[in-house]
Image (cartoon, rainbow, N blue to C red):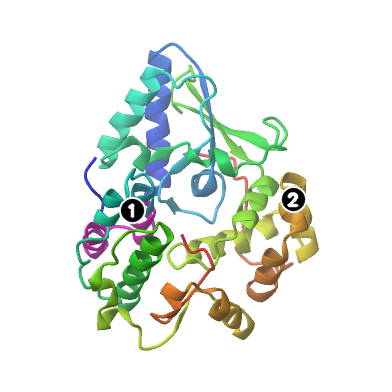
């Protein structure tokens, strides 16, 4: 698993590699890693899901990713960073409106080589609810925590509001959301204000 | 790339690796295989016995489910060992009676038969 410190360190190194290549590259992070970056309720992830790099993935990027994989103790680059998430993303999501810039890397230094974007809280909730893996034998526990917290972050008060958010990004899925509605009704509560309220985004490294 | 089998997966988890990450990586590896022989090889060796009986059952269900789904020619015999059958039902949910009832119907036969009640498409 990759924790927050490892994730930030890895992106620092990617940022340094970009600066060395005299370029600036944008990376959009999804899933658990976006929550590690920008929430106060996720602390580790199996790997880092990113949107496919626009254009051809530069050689320096692939080499840096492979080097970091070795340093993290992984056999393959895709064990820690993979861009297979593209299939699950919304065609309606806009770069500027439905994502925000989490930060630039390397953190130290005047020149940024890497800009990291993450989805907004509503887009993140839509992605999680569309997949709704809360009864997964292996990943279910973590998915339940994410889905319990994301509606609170979005000030969602009931199931209809949650499904409406899904509909903004995945209209077809929202029209056939019987499973999501059933799961939400059976397993989750809405409108509770916890003492340690979930926050997303948290704007600090 | 080194072959990633269920046996290897069980060893890694037993050695303390993350169950979530290793299971995901195993599935990625399995889905990446080009031939049925390569897919079958992922299940050929018996996984180590785990401290958690649920994992023993899950490995058996996983092997049989994927073997049937991809119409592999043989099912691994170890998947039908007595230790794979849970004595108590395992509902992979925190939901109550209605959710459990739903999972009784949705769970694939390969899982139900081992007393695991889960999603209709667990992988």
The residue lying toward the viewer, choosing from A59 and A176, is A176
Q: Residue at x 72, y 66 (%)?
A: A178
Residue B14 place in picture, x, y as percent: 23, 65
Q: Residue at x 68, y 37 (%)?
A: A91
Q: Which residue is mark 2?
A: A172
Q: CA distance from mark 1 to mark 2?
A: 31 Å
Marked residue chain, label 1: B
Residue A64 place in picture, x, y as percent: 34, 26
Residue B122 on the magenta span: no
Residue A107 place in picture, x, y as percent: 46, 28
The correct choice, above or below, for A110 with respect to A10 in the image is: above
Label 1 crowding class (10 Å Cα cut-off): few <14, some 14-19, many 20+?
A: some
Q: How many marks?
A: 2
User: Mark on residue B61?
Assistant: none
Q: Residue at x 50, y 17 (%)?
A: A24
Q: What element does badge 1 sit on?
A: helix
Residues drawn in magenta: B5-25
Q: Which residue is mark 1?
A: B26
| Majority secondary structure of magenta residues | helix
């Amino acid at each position: 698993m990759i924790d927050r410190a490892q994730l930030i360190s890895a992106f620092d190194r990617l940022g340094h590699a970009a600066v060395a290549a005299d370029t600036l590259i944008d990376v959009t992070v999804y899933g658990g890693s976006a929550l590690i970056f920008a929430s106060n309720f996720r602390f580790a992830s199996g790997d880092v899901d990113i949107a496919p790099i626009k254009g051809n993935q530069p050689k320096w990027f692939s080499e840096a990713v492979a080097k970091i994989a070795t340093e993290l103790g992984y056999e393959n680059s895709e064990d820690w960073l993979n861009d297979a998430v593209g299939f699950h993303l919304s065609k309606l999501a806009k770069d500027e409106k439905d994502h925000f810039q989490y930060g630039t890397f390397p953190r130290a230094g005047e020149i940024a080589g890497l800009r990291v974007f993450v989805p907004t809280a509503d887009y993140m909730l839509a992605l999680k609810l569309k997949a709704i893996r809360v009864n997964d034998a292996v990943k279910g526990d973590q998915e339940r925590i994410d889905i319990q917290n994301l509606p609170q972050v979005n000030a969602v008060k009931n199931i209809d509001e949650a499904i409406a958010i899904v509909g903004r990004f995945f209209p077809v899925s929202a029209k056939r959301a019987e499973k999501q509605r059933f799961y939400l009704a059976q397993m989750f509560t809405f409108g509770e204000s916890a003492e340690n309220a979930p926050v997303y985004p948290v704007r600090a490294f | 790339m080194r072959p990633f089998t269920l046996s290897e997966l069980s060893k890694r988890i037993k050695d303390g690796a993350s169950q979530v990450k290793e299971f995901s990586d195993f599935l990625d590896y399995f889905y990446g295989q080009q031939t049925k022989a390569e897919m079958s090889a992922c299940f050929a060796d018996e996984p180590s016995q785990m401290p958690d009986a649920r994992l023993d059952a899950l490995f058996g269900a996983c092997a049989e489910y994927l073997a049937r789904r991809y119409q592999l020619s043989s099912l691994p015999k170890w998947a039908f060992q007595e230790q794979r059958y849970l004595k108590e039902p395992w509902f992979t949910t925190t939901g109550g009676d209605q959710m459990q009832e739903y999972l009784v119907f949705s769970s694939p036969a390969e899982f139900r038969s081992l007393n695991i009640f889960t999603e209709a498409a667990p992988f």
